[in-house]
Amino acid sequence: MKLVLAGVELPLSDFSLRLDATLSAPVTGIFGPSGAGKTSLLDLLAGLRRAQTGRIELDGELLSDAARGLHLEPRYRRLGYVPQDGALFPHLSVRRNLLYGYRPELASAAMRFEAVLALLALEPLLERRIAHLSGGERQRVALGRALLCAPRLLLLDEPLSGLDAELKTRIVSYLRAIRRELGLPMLYVSHHAEEILELCDEVLILERGQLVERGSPALLLAPSTWPARSLESAS
Amino acid sequence: MLSPPEWQILGFSLAAAGGSTLLILAPGIVLSWWLARFRWPGKSLVETLVSLPLVMPPVATGFLLLRLLGRRGPFGSWLESLGIDVVFTWKAVVLAMAVMSFPLLVRTLRPAFEAVEPRLEQIARTLGAGGLRVFFTITLPLAARGVASGALLAFARALGEFGATVIVAGNIPGKTTTASVEIFHLIQLGKDAEALRLMGAMVVASFALLWLHEGWLRKPRLRR
């Protein structure tokens, strides 16, 4: 995977998100305090927002180029977006949520319906209504739904937020399984250093829309740096 | 009990109100969704125009329709060239009801569309859905209660329509006489007993509609 963000600028309410970076790690973490522009970055990649300037490319394909007025519609981008609260469709069953964007003609064997059901243990939930799912079950369904649209890249926005420690461990094991068995690149947004350390190969640290540091999570987010990081987050 | 002509009047009123509701449902849904989701030039002008029949005297709205649809009116002459007569026919009844109930429909639908979480529509787009598919599979089903509620209120409003109808469709027995117009006519003739019977039927119909609306559609959604 090679994701290029060249001179990208997106004005937010009180600052602008500015990025110039090429990402190629299998799992890249986007770390920063709440309101740093992490979700806006994912929205930008998914095509839900338009950058004012700059160009975004994924594996050589142009997703957007502000200078030329190019903007590939979200539906053609094939990015699996798992938003923070899952954003499951409340009027549809789990099965119909999962099948909403299913692209069997594009899916590899490992990303076909039955395979994804097995990977995320979704079979027992299929006929359930969204209102009857627990937080962890919702996240699994949201993950499954994103995987089934045959994505080239998975965008994960705080997928563990609001879950207790035991559930977090389980979802992390599912994310590891996705990485191991599907080889699908991921962008993992979180403001919890331990999650990034556990899952990511590289981390980008965002503060007020600016990339302030990037590198190995073990170096940048080692437990010894946590107090400093959480102080920054609180400020 | 109602007499056969009274049953005919009641049946015609229900059919015309149903027809007018069907007529405005699709444009009402599209307009409300546009008002709820997009900003465009002239939006507040359209909002005001749509709501106008709500505050204008119904008789004045009826008179405006008469001038527009009469044979010498801008639309009337065009319709006449197509061989379509509207004024003083059942079509005028349906049209008057439609114009008078449209604002109520839009005012109920718009908040229903506003209440649909835009994030769900966005995520549907990332899953490969185009605009129409998002609308029909996410937006409309999630606003369905509001749509049913708006349609029911519009139907009830149409059923009670009098002022605009009587001006643009008149009171032609068996052709354009609605229950509201007939009640007015009977009172004028001093036939209070008949007026009361028809009024009773209207009270039952209106009560049933509102009861359905309040008791069923406005209950908090338990299934989600």
Image: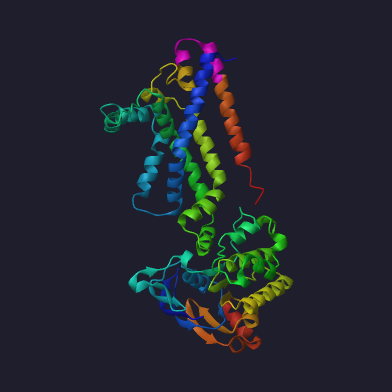
For the C terminus of chain A, give its image quadrant.
bottom right
Predominant SS along the magenta part: helix
Identity of the residue furthest to the top in this view: B190
Residue B38, relative to residue A156: is it above or below?
above
Query: Residue at 54% across / 68% down in the picture?
Result: A106
Count of numbered circles on the image: 0
Query: Residue at 54% across / 54% down in the picture?
Result: B138
Identity of the residue furthest to the bottom in this view: A219
- Visible residue check, residue B115: no
Residue A42, relative to residue B168: is it above or below?
below
Q: Position of residue B134 (x, y in %)?
A: 50, 55
Residue B184 part of the magenta-drawn span: no
Residue B192 part of the magenta-drawn span: yes
Q: Where is residue A19 in the image (x, y as percent from the top left)?
A: 45, 79
Query: Residue at 43% across / 29% down in the picture?
Result: B94
Q: Position of residue A60 (x, y in %)?
A: 44, 79
Q: Where is residue A175 in the image (x, y as percent from the top left)?
A: 65, 75
Q: Quadrant of the rendered structure where residue B7 is?
A: top right
* Range covered by the magenta-colored residues: B185-199
**Side of A87 where B159 appears, left or right:** left
- Visible residue check, residue A51: yes
Between B184 and A225, which is closer to the camera in this rendering? B184
Between B196 and B175, which is closer to the camera in this rendering? B175
**Side of A184 where B178 appears, left or right:** left
Between B47 and A183, which is closer to the camera in this rendering? A183
Residue A32, relative to residue A139: is it above or below?
below
Residue B53, relative to residue A207: is it above or below?
above
